[in-house]
Amino acid sequence: MERAQAWLKRYGRPLEMALWDFHFAGGSKENVIRYLSAFQNEDGGFGHGLEPDFWLPKSSPMASWMAGQILVEIKADLSDKIVERLIQYLMTCEQVLPGMWPTVLPENNDYPHAPWWHWSEEAQTTWMFNPSVELAAFLVYWSPPYSREAALGWQSLVPAVKYIMQVDGVDWHELRNFWQCLKLLRHHEGRFTAQFGYTFSEVESRLKGLILETVDGEPAGWAGAYKPLPLEFVKDASDPLYSELKPLVEENLRFFLSSRDKWGIWGITWGWADYPSEFAIASRYWQGIRAVERYKTLRAFGRV
């Protein structure tokens, strides 16, 4: 971990270094917010390449989702101005379909970006509720129970829950969004039946089944690939999926430990078709993001 920390200081973004300090060196929430705020626009949304695979300066729901994940991670709340402004952005950002904020914006195409973030007329049918189901959960999670903000969150979740209870197949990134949404709403279990017509347990069971079908169970093929590994979903032993995925989780932990480079850092297993110079920068940013995330997981399971 000392070598990984040294790598982050030399090559990572200040934001990931602040997150590293927060998790492993007694750093403050306020320091993380300081660096995250650099990516926040006047409208309260986030842009400027916070998600390194697209460099759009303008606020977008996807970059704002990434900011929201960080703010949940550091236990920020409405007393933090950065959260209040994010909520304001979600309240004013127009949905393209019921429950769906636009995943990709047309302006993405004007800036360096990965091919999967290229906007087209059909883009939303590919992304569906990624990341909207988590954005809706943020509104419920951070807002007073009977506020306008919470009401929009619950309203936006209705089509998302209907979809996940009926759909045959789901992209694993979207499944991850739904799983995180449930974690954020666990304290609201009692509202599920009246709101959606399904109990919390029924939705959780449905998601567990879809995730168990999706997780890649062949460790021999994990190296050099970008696949739905068990630790994309299971972040610690308290996760409801852990008991059913425990052998694969153990394999995944061993894989993380054995696949580090001499700096204690992991390589990136995807690339861009265009913008090679910009991708060289983006890949370094992703290595920093991945380092913080994976060392958090390794520590949660007592491996570092």
Image: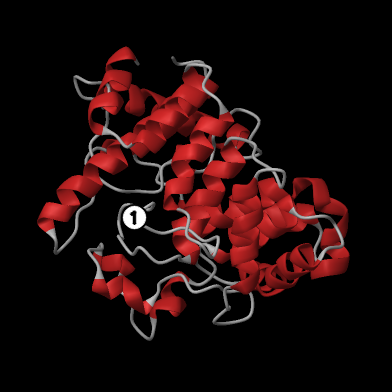
Residue 141 as seen in the image, left or right of residue 247 = right
The N terminus: image quadrant: top left
Question: x%, y% of residue 176?
Answer: 52, 52
User: Is 196 situated above or below 4?
Assistant: below
Task: Name the amino acid, label 1.
Answer: Gly
Closer-to-camera residue (222/281) = 281
| Within-10-Å neighbours for mark 1: few <14, some 14–19, many 20+ | many
Q: Residue furthest left?
A: 277
The C terminus: image quadrant: top left
Residue drawn where x is 61% and y is 27% of the image: 237
Residue drawn where x is 47% and y is 31% of the image: 249
Residue 126 as seen in the image, left or right of residue 87 = left
Closer-to-camera residue (190/37) = 37
Question: x%, y% of residue 146?
Answer: 87, 62
User: Is 212 situated above or below 106?
Assistant: above
Label count reads 1
User: Is 106 situated above or below 36?
Assistant: below
Closer-to-camera residue (257/156) = 156
Instruction: Name the secondary structure under disc 1.
Output: loop
Q: Which residue is mark 1?
A: 49
Question: x%, y% of residue 235?
Answer: 54, 34
Closer-to-camera residue (102/255) = 102
Q: Residue furthest bottom?
A: 121
User: Is 45 situated above or below 106?
Assistant: above
Say if residue 174 shows up in the picture: yes
Residue 1 as seen in the image, left or right of residue 112 = right
Question: x%, y% of residue 288?
Answer: 32, 35
